[in-house]
Amino acid sequence: MDPIIRLENVSFSYKINEKTKVSVLKNISLSIFPGEYVAIIGHNGSGKSTLSKLLNGILTPDHGEVWVHGHNTKDTNKKRAIRQAVGMVFQHPDNQIVATIVEEDVAFGLENIGVPREEMKKRVDEALNVVKMSPFRHRPPHHLSGGQKQRVAIAGVLAMQPECIVFDEATSMLDSFGRKEVIQVMRQMNNMGMTIITVTHHMSEAAEAGRIIVVEDGEIVMDGTPREIFKHKQELEALKLEVPSVSQMAEVIHRQFADFSRDIIHEHEFIGEVEEFLSGGVGS
Amino acid sequence: MSSEFDISRNITIGQYVPTGSFIHRLDPRIKLLIFVFLVVAIALNTSYIGNAVGLILSLYLFWASKIPISYGLSGVKPAIPFIIILAVLQLLFQGQLFSGGKVFVDYGFILITSESIRLVIVSAVRFIEIIFLSSVLTLSTSTTELTHSIQSLLSPLKKMNFPVHEISLITTISIRFVPTFAIEMEKMMKAQASRGADFGSGSWWRIIQRTKEMFPIIIPLFNIALARAEDLILAMEARCYTPGGERSTYSVYKAVTKDYLILLVGLLLTLLLLFYPFPI
């Protein structure tokens, strides 16, 4: 299977002034395949957000190449095709809504790529349905909660029918309720076949993904399933990252009761393990 | 809680009152056109009867749109000082220019004639009529409809390379961010007040002092606006926005026979106000 996004020896640095440059990404190679659900984690300043901005040509690498569907992101003629294939949802819910009414904002991207009106109506309806914002379609955005605004932003990207959506810390400004709403939408879209890449520092959110990439100091230091990654508690702590809180709790219990599994990353697994433990199923 | 900082609640721009009347359902472009016609007609009409007709018409529009007249009056209230100052100035100093009719007072440079009194009364009534008309327009039309109709009415200018869509996008984005910045400003004022800053305690005539008080708010607000703009550019670019690019539009208005009939009525009224020789 061909990857949707392929990074080849990518390096990137921000210019501070004529002389000094800060190197953010160093020689990264990475492939993202269709249908994957990838979480990119790393502490602040590790370069994870910069990495996400390279994926649809908002930034272009200093060295190396980024290929989206065989288009190089440095090719300005292909910019539109690349951004249509890889949509992006940003951190601030307020700073990415353009229009004064929800449905018009969802239509903004479609207007930009010149979708005919009838088709546009259909796609706006569908996108609002997926994120469950149809009842709010005629509302002005400032009457919505953070989670609702972020779902509108997702609908705006979704309506453009991309193959992949990148969430650049899209849940970090939300309360836990809003975060749950957005994560639910991500999962649902991934189930529909959409490739999801989420940049996050919430470990419970990363645990939802099928693959975790850990970025440290501009380099990929770990790449694997959540279960594999979260086994390396010490290494993660050295990178100023932690494992999900349920894993921490399981670890604490495991120290007291060796039969209680420490290999837990999801809430429902934890509950299952507790139930089994109480009923005497484990170890007896 | 004191309402001193509740700016976002006091914003009247885009205060849309949905009553579902036939005026609300009118094609917004037609509404805007008739509004422009009537304002021009009222601004040029100098007769008492003509302006009485205009006043009755604007009151009728309030009634027809089922919007409480108090909304219109609250628009007139802040304008009253201006109307009074204007009336006094006109009465005292414009007599020489409008010196027709009977002379009532002729004292030094002050000349008050029946013509200058007409000017004073007509301008005051005109002011009120135009405030009423624009209130009906903005209260019965959402900001989105307004920006779309401006875009649609200006679209013939596209042929002359006039950036119609860009202008309408700029308008939309500014309207979109008014409440956002109001909330932002509220937060900042509260934060600064909690650290001892003093807002609004100076008397209203001490304009310089009151302006100075606003600096600690305005400057960070500019900063925030620029940061937001940068984010917004990224988000727009990520959604394939290309300035000046070929694009389609989501909202399209279709005027029906009823709309054209109303336009005709509006035009007739405009012509009546402009050209009918009212006796007084």
Image: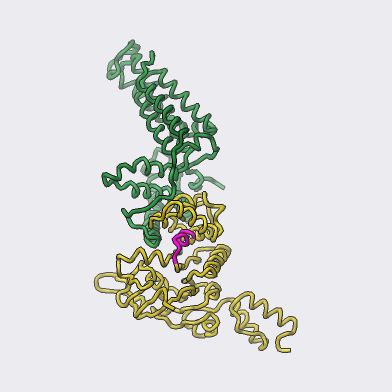
Chain colours: A yellow, B green
Magenta span: A155-162
Is residue B1 in view from this perspective? yes
Is residue B186 in view from this perspective? no
Q: Nearer the viewer, residue B147 or A205?
A: B147
Total marks shown come to 0
Q: Quadrant of residue B146?
A: top left
Q: Quadrant of the C terminus of chain A?
A: bottom right
The residue shown at (44%, 21%) is B53
Q: Quadrant of the N terminus of chain A?
A: bottom left
- Where does the image place residue B178, in percent across and percent down from the top left? 43, 49
Position of B58 with respect to A281 (left or right) is left
* Vertical comparison of B136 with A139: above or below: above
The residue shown at (38%, 80%) is A29
Based on the picture, tell me whether residue A157 belongs to the magenta stretch.
Answer: yes
Based on the picture, tell me whether residue B12 belongs to the magenta stretch.
Answer: no
* Vertical comparison of A121 with A34: above or below: above
* Vertical comparison of B142 with B73: above or below: below
Q: Nearer the viewer, residue A182 or A31?
A: A31
Which residue is situated farthest in the top direction here? Answer: B102
Q: Quadrant of residue A220?
A: bottom left
- Where does the image place residue B55, in percent across and percent down from the top left? 45, 24
- Where does the image place residue A217, in percent across and percent down from the top left? 40, 79
Which residue is situated farthest in the left direction here? Answer: A18
- Where does the image place residue B208, in percent across and percent down from the top left? 36, 43
